Image (tube, helix red, strand yellow):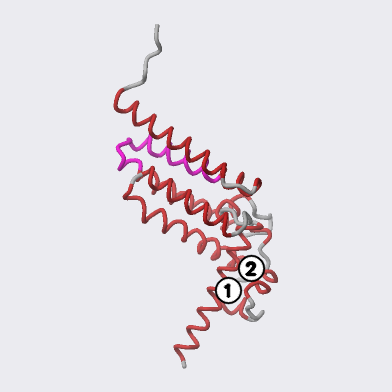
Amino acid sequence: MAAATASAKGSTRRRMLVTAAEVLRERGAAGVTIDEVLARSGAPRGSVYYHFPDGRAQLITEALQFAGDSITSLIDAAVHRGGAALVSEFVAFWERTLADSDFAAGCPVVAAAIGSSPDDDPALRTTAGEIFGHWRAALGRAFVADGFDESEARSLAVTCIASLEGAVVLCRAGGSVAPLHDVADQIEFLVKSREFIKRYGMPHKPS
């Protein structure tokens, strides 16, 4: 009986986190309200302060970490395959996410970083920054494994993340994954161009 009760508690808490993460993706941090999470999750009102004693602020922060971890685990699992493969994994992930949500779901980390209200806990933006930092570091390691020096790898990692996150925004606005494919093609060209220059040097203009 105790095990069943613990399982039920875990189920309710997880359901609330999943729901809060969904709202965060769609509406940003300012749009995550306890009423919306309860309505979507079907959780009883008393469960909010039972599972999240610090209320809305704790719920949003943990939902951000929960959502960010799902992307982080995908990135960490693909690091050993190199930068190009990692970018492809990221693109495939966002293709699925956008299609499954009918282009309603964006990146929860972006939503937390730029979509917070003045009343939201400042720690929310800090958490978003930490997640982005982890992604940059992981992608940087992947490019180092591809043979780039650390400085160049860091620059490529920032460029990739900024470009892909921007593409996700354009995809949501236009209801199409075309911007994601366009950005992926340009990233591939950039990486291959840098690999060419690293191997053969900068091409000289004809005199």
Q: Residue at x 37, y 43 (%)?
A: 83
Mark 1: which amino acid? Answer: Phe
> Residue furthest toward the bottom?
1
Mark 2: which amino acid? Answer: Arg
Q: Are marks 2 and 1 in contact (CB under 8 Å)?
A: yes
Specify whether 197 is left or right of 60: left
Q: Which residue is mark 1?
A: 52
- Residue 70 in percent (x, y) is at 47, 61
Quadrant for the C terminus in the image:
top left
Q: Which residue is mark 2?
A: 56
Q: Residue at x 67, y 79 (%)?
A: 45
- Residue 34 in percent (x, y) is at 67, 70
- Identify the element where label 2 is drawn: helix
Specify whether 116 is left or right of 92: right
Q: Indicate yes or no whether the magenta region holds residue 132.
A: no
Q: In which image quadrant can residue 29 be found?
A: bottom right
In the rendered image, the vertical position of residue 35 relative to residue 175, given as above or below? below
Residue span colored magenta: 143-165
> Residue furthest toward the top?
207
Badge 2: residue crowd in 10 Å (few <14, some 14–19, many ≥20) = some
Badge 1: residue crowd in 10 Å (few <14, some 14–19, many ≥20) = some
Q: In which image quadrant can residue 149 be found?
A: top left
In the rendered image, the vertical position of residue 124 relative to residue 188, given as above or below? below
